[in-house]
Amino acid sequence: MNYGLYNREIMVGYLILLLVYINASIWWYVIAGVLISVGKIVDMRLANEKIGRQWSHPFFILAGGLLFWSGSIYILVISGALEVFPLIDDRKQFIFLTVLASS
């Protein structure tokens, strides 16, 4: 744990701690949202209802999760809370590729 996160200015410290929480927990929320959407699709299929519009919801949730994850990592690296970007070391390439992957 980097205890330097707690020794910053109050508003900057709260923002950094919020982004650390988002970075650590976003995939749990994404998995929960996708499972809820898949459950709704299964229920509609068992009730013989049309499910055409429901297929976009899990992909929208995944794209939103990827954007929140990449945005939080980008700000954490710029602020010095993290040392390197995952997967790609260049900050411009990282944010470009994650935004491209989410769209």
Image (tube, rainbow, N blue to C red):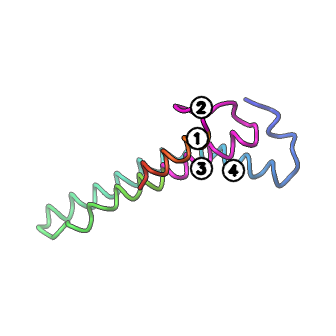
Identify the mark at residue 18; answer none if there is no mark. Answer: 4
| Mark before the other along the chain sequence, 4 or 2 | 4
In the shown orientation, is residue 101 left or right of residue 24? left
Frontmost residue, 9 versus 75: 75
Q: Identify the amino acid type marked 3.
A: Gly
Q: Identify the amino acid type marked 1.
A: Ala
Q: Mark 2 points at which residue?
A: 89
| Mark before the other along the chain sequence, 3 or 1 | 1
Q: For the residue labelled by badge 1, is the local secondary structure a helix, a strand or a loop?
A: helix
Name the residue located 62 percent from the left edge and 47 percent from the top edge.
Answer: 72
Residue interval drawn in magenta: 66-90
Of badges 3 and 1, the one in the foreground is: 3
- Distance from label 4 to label 1 (Cα)? 10 Å
Q: Within 10 Å of the Cα at label 3, are there few (<14), some (14-19), or many (20+) other Cα atoms?
A: some
| Mark before the other along the chain sequence, 4 or 1 | 4
Answer yes or no: do the residues labelled 2 and 3 have beta carbons within 8 Å?
Answer: no
Q: Name the residue under label 3.
A: 71
